[in-house]
Amino acid sequence: MELRDVGHVISDLARLGLVVARKVVSQSLADERAVSPQMVGELVGRIHPRRMKVRVAEIREETFTTKTFRLTPLDEPFPPFRAGQFVNLFLAVDGVRTSRPYTISSSPARRAYIDITVRRMTSGFVSQYLCDRAAVGDQFELSDPAGCFYHDPIVDTGRLVFLAGGCGITPFMSMVRNATDTKENLDMHLIYGNRIPDDVIFRDELAGLASVMENLKVDAVISEPPDGYSGLTGFLDAQMIERLVGDVKDKTFFVCGPHAMYTLCLDALEKLGLSRRRVKRELSGPLPDITLVEGWPEKLDGRQEFRVTIEGGPEPFKVRSGEPLLNSLERNHRGTDALCRSGECGACRTRLVKGEVFMPPSVSLRRSDAIFGYIHPCAAYPMSDLTIRL
């Protein structure tokens, strides 16, 4: 087997996992040459690069506040991904290097491009830049696809209920589009909550798909309907879910949307008797107001300023108690690697040498990290002057 053929072998096996790919490649070449770790690492790296250079090929306006950016690769083809996974977009905004995770809204079956769909937020540093200033031809970097928010036929049922809110529609759009492309035999029910009808992203496409796909049902729920609105109104609470879904016990639920939606939906599903192992929730980024989270110290109102010292770094700089530490690091050009920006993946893991931070209960900090003083700065809020080690 020639070396150029090995890439095709790995590409075919990429969905089975890197461990299997390494093993098969080694066995395939065993009779002709010794396979060095460097060779396998290089081949696997081509299939799953840590960073990918991309170009904005197209920008589509989905709603008044939302745009889809079609990204095409500048170098190697995009790696395989699962419908529901996300990529981290690396960019510079007014001299500040930062990143944001965005769920892929396009189908994995269409490998020539990756779509991300971004809603312009009032206080969104990156979303405002993308929606107001990004243009076709702009170049960025992406991480390789990540995340576990996808249908797993080994552990999930084949009857899926998607609870989406606002821009949380994106992973479900990828799943629906993928099912259309691959003819996957899944029973899908999308319940999509928005404030007003004009906020519904992909409205026309979803209506068209639901009209031709026997295995897709779409219900839009509006919380602040205009006069004369005849559709479903209310919230995705237990009463609404039971009304639309009926018996929940033989279904797998996926939840993605704004922070307030998680408490509402998860409590509703628990009230309806659904086992937590039948519920998957997506990462949702920093909390909009950390001071409202249970456990936040009453002595702080989010506006206090402290000083951060980086071991071996430049002069200390100011940080605000109500802002994630990672944001302040990036603004002062001391950013560290980050991926989910939700306190779960650990990519930005940093040693806290001195001082105190608040991290919400949702942060997935390993027990050993807690013992040895590591924090996730993407979800760590200063409570005093800090000394950290990057």
Image (cartoon, rainbow, N blue to C red):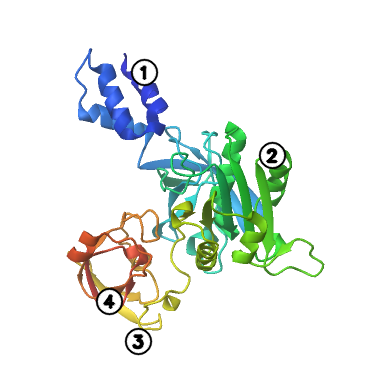
Q: Earlier in the sequence, mark 2 or mark 1?
A: 1
Q: Mark 4 and mark 2: span between their CA atoms?
A: 58 Å
List x then y, in percent, for residue 223: 67, 68
Residue underneath mark 1? 5
Q: Mark 3 and mark 4: span between their CA atoms?
A: 17 Å
Q: Mark 2 and mark 3: span between their CA atoms?
A: 56 Å
Q: Quadrant of the C terminus?
A: bottom left
Q: Are marks 2 and 3 in contact (CB under 8 Å)?
A: no
Nearer to the camera, 378 or 279: 279
Q: Mark 2 and mark 1: span between their CA atoms?
A: 41 Å
Residue underneath mark 3? 299
Q: Nearer the viewer, mark 3 or mark 4?
A: 3
Residue underneath mark 4? 307
Q: Earlier in the sequence, mark 3 or mark 1?
A: 1
Residue type at the position of mark 3: Lys
Residue type at the position of mark 4: Arg
With respect to residue 234, does 77 lie above or below? above
* Residue 85 marker: none
